[in-house]
Amino acid sequence: MTPNKPVSITDYTPLVGQEKIEELLRFGEELKGLKLQQINSARFGGGVAEMLLSLIPLERSLGLDVTWDVIEGDPAFFTYTKTMHNFLQGKPGTLDLLGAKAYWETNRRNYPLVNESADAVLVHDPQPAGLITYVPEAVRRRQKWLWRCHIQTSREVCTLMNPIRPLIELYDAAVYSSTRYCTWGTRSFIILPYIDPLSDKNRELTEAEIQSVLERHGIGDLDEKPLITLVSRFDPFKGHAYAIESFAAVRKERRCQLLLVGGTASDDPENELILSEILEKTAGMEDVRVLNLPADSHRDINALQRASAIILQPSVKEGFGLTVTEGLWKRKPVIAGDTGGIPAQIADGYNGYLINPGEAGVPEMTERIIFLLDNPVIAREMGRRGWETVRERFLITRGLWDELMLIKTMLQHP
Ligand code: UDP
């Protein structure tokens, strides 16, 4: 499948300036024809797919020969990898032997996806990490294998027991989103994630476009009741319950509405359960909407973020939090958990607010929401600063530069 729209790197010049674009074009000249294979476990849904959909066309437009493959697995495999994901983020769980069997069988079965003529293979997250064990020695010597970790690996877990560490140590390098995380691998690099300002998720929309999305979802009355929005997969770490609890307290004092926008990802078996818990919690609550949208609802999410007065992301753990970046890019103040990659994006009180992750953050969230509702001029200024933060640090052109530099470094220093 061909990811995303046709793009040219020069389309980004008005946002990032000529100099950065020329640097990328020179990089493209240096790496022209390089064969890079990207492998993950979902074509849509979640932050990894979101970034690859935009990154790969840009890498191709610079002259790299990039392919993108997605491993396939059955529910037993994805249940096991989600347990591992949660475990690595610090949630206790049992990694059962049957699940481990499904993990290895699935990775073995998917091995034919591996392009043995690629110069570099970039594997995302734990699901396809096991592929490396099936590479024949002669092929392995020719190729660079890089593992990209998008999750917030908890230090407590690493020091206790770690099911994935020996695997990651087989890679030439591992890439993380923060130095604060537990890192493994012979060499580790940090690359902060990014958003594509020209994608359907993030491009500017007209008032009419925003309005039509609101009407389609039956959301109105925004002047009377400003919209407070949380966009996230239905996942135990995203903090939906805290947002609901805080909103219930805010609504007693101010007129507003809560929108919980989520979806499912094909590699995430927990979504249905968490969604039903949310529906149960919000049943009978006034001014709360839960939208379960298809995975390709990028423009709708863009419009809903733009229509919001405040964006919430009260995560307990968060590898990076592209939803925070997206909210800041829409010029919204973002109130989010002080965890994982979120403090790299939000300076407390400057472009949003950091709150304690978990139950302890609920009173703070309530107080901050009320403050922002009461002070729209401050909220607007915070939003403007948020946009500027993203423009300077979290756009795809920077992510592209980082990835190309990583590959160049690895190829030059065997
Ligand atoms: N997302 C989406 N639909 C949803 C929920 C999330 O398109 O129903 C997108 C969201 O806009 C963001 C990405 O999925 O681009 C989530 O990335 P993030 O880093 O916030 O979290 P992850 O899901 O990777 O843990």
Image (cartoon, rainbow, N blue to C red):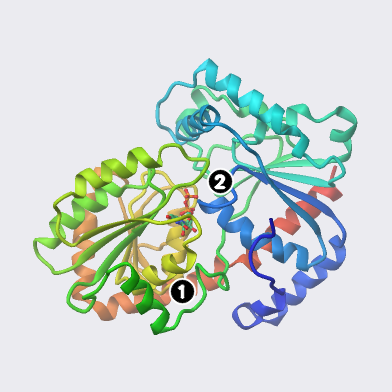
Q: Nearer the viewer, residue 197 or 288?
A: 288
Distance of label 2 from label 1 (alpha carbons): 23 Å
Instruction: Using residue 245 as the reference point, say whether residue 39 is left or right of it.
Output: right
From what the image shows, is residue 327 above or below residue 314? below
From what the image shows, is residue 186 above or below residue 47? above
Quadrant location, the C terminus = top right
Instruction: Using residue 76 as the reference point, say whether residue 237 is left or right of it.
Output: left
- Across and down, in percent, residue 332 comes to 36, 71
Q: Which residue is mark 1?
A: 387
> Looking at the rendering, which quadrant does residue 301 occupy?
bottom left
Instruction: Using residue 286 as the reference point, say whether residue 89 is left or right of it.
Output: right
The residue most toward the top is: 97
State how many labels appear: 2
Secondary structure under tag 1 reads: helix
The residue most toward the left is: 252
Mark before the other along the chain sequence, 2 or 1 = 2
Disc 1 residue: CB within 8 Å of ligand 1: no
Secondary structure under tag 2 reads: loop
- Across and down, in percent, residue 358 comes to 29, 44
- Across and down, in percent, residue 157 comes to 48, 29
Disc 1 residue type? Answer: Trp
Disc 2 residue type? Answer: His
From what the image shows, is residue 262 above or below residue 304? above
Question: Which residue is rendered at x = 60% and y = 19% of the image?
Answer: 101
Number of residues whose C-alpha sits closer than 10 Å to that of mark 2, classed few (under 14), some (14–19) or many (20 or more): many
Disc 2 residue: CB within 8 Å of ligand 1: yes
Tags 2 and 1 touching, CB below 8 Å: no
From what the image shows, is residue 214 above or below residue 168? below
Question: Which residue is rendered at x = 69% and y = 60% of the image?
Answer: 2
Q: Which residue is mark 2?
A: 150
- Across and down, in percent, residue 283 comes to 18, 49
